[in-house]
Amino acid sequence: MTHHRIATTADTAVDVFTAERRPVLTVEPGDTVTVHTLDAAGYTERLPAPGVDVPTLISPRRGHCLLGPIAVAGARPGQVLAVRFDDLVPDDWGYTGSGGVDTPLNRALGLADPSTRGPLLWDIDASAGTASNQLGLGVRTAPFLGVVGVPPEATGEHVTTPPRAVGGGNIDCRELVAGATLYLPVTVPDALLTVGDGHAAQGDGEVSGTAVECGMTTTMTLSLLDTAPVAGTHADTPAGRITFGFDADLNAATTTALDRMVDWIAAEHGIGRAEALAMASVAVSMRITQIANRTWGVHALLAHGAILTQTR
């Protein structure tokens, strides 16, 4: 197996999902890739103060500043791309935006007017696992990539903002830390994976619309599976098994995530769906992944060891 290294540059950066762009790298299944991505905005230098813009790598940009696509040789629709996150190291600074944007949530919170902005600028200490801001407040870091996805269709350019039932993308799930494996159904030949949007820390929901946005050095191993335990995008993480739902309707997103977790439990333990739903009711936590992108993300989390087995 080969270990590849690639950084985000003007030649490797992209701000859409597309199968029509030439791959910036081609790997074999089982290869490991270390990538350095810029923050979601693609800033090319550190912000001098909270909320102050600096030049961006892509200008004007249509979406997140990402790296890709990365081709996985031989991948074909019907297979599943397994993205195992071996290591994630944030850069030494980041930012969080808040308020000042006219969204339904900000209007409800009284924070839609530009005068209500409250940006944070963070110093990140990756070795200590902490980040601190200009208010003198800090958080523990748990780095992950917000955007990991493949093109939803074989043609066209597709915006990076929403997470998608087909292709993944801007999932923003805080559980996809080092040690996690994300499973993405392959949608196009060679998979064409695109990644970026580093987050040093984030709560479930990403309620301001941003996390601790930062550059990230990510080491990941890419593999192909012919079958998967459940349909759609799902994950096996240090926190437990996860199934996802994405939809503009919160109820629909929740139902999808739960439906797939019920399938997973039923298959794993050889029980019916009704019994699996009962087990989910006592062992599975339903969480709002993110509300930042006007498409609800919901994930069902089954913690490791939550369902006990015994000999009858």
Image: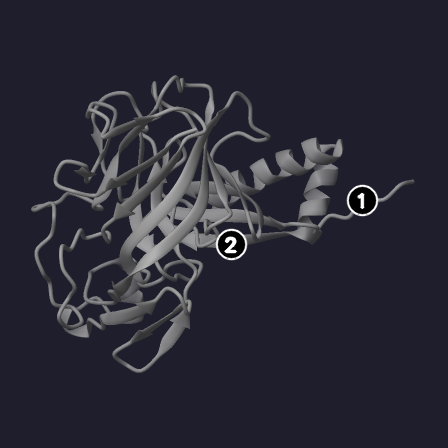
Residue nearer the viewer, 232 or 255? 232
Residue bearing mark 2:
287
Q: Measured from the top left, where is residue 92 in percent x and y? A: 28, 64
For disc 1, the marked residue is 309
Indicate left or right for 216 with 186 as reference: left
Q: CA distance from mark 1 to mark 2?
A: 25 Å
Residue placed furthest toward the front = 2
In the picture, the disc for residue 189 is none
Give percent across and percent down for residue 255: 53, 41
Residue 198 placement (x, y as % from top left):
31, 53
Q: Amino acid at mark 1?
A: Thr
Nearest to viewer (mark 1 / mark 2):
1
Q: Is residue 226 above or below residue 58?
A: above
Q: Residue furthest bottom?
A: 136
> Earlier along the polypeptide chain: callout 1 or callout 2?
2
> Please, which colouring scheme is shown?
one colour
Point out residue 297 in the picture as x, y percentages from the top left corner: 42, 47
Q: Amino acid at mark 2?
A: Arg
Badge 2: residue crowd in 10 Å (few <14, some 14–19, many ≥20): some
Q: Is residue 277 left or right of residue 13?
A: right
* SS of the residue under disc 2: strand
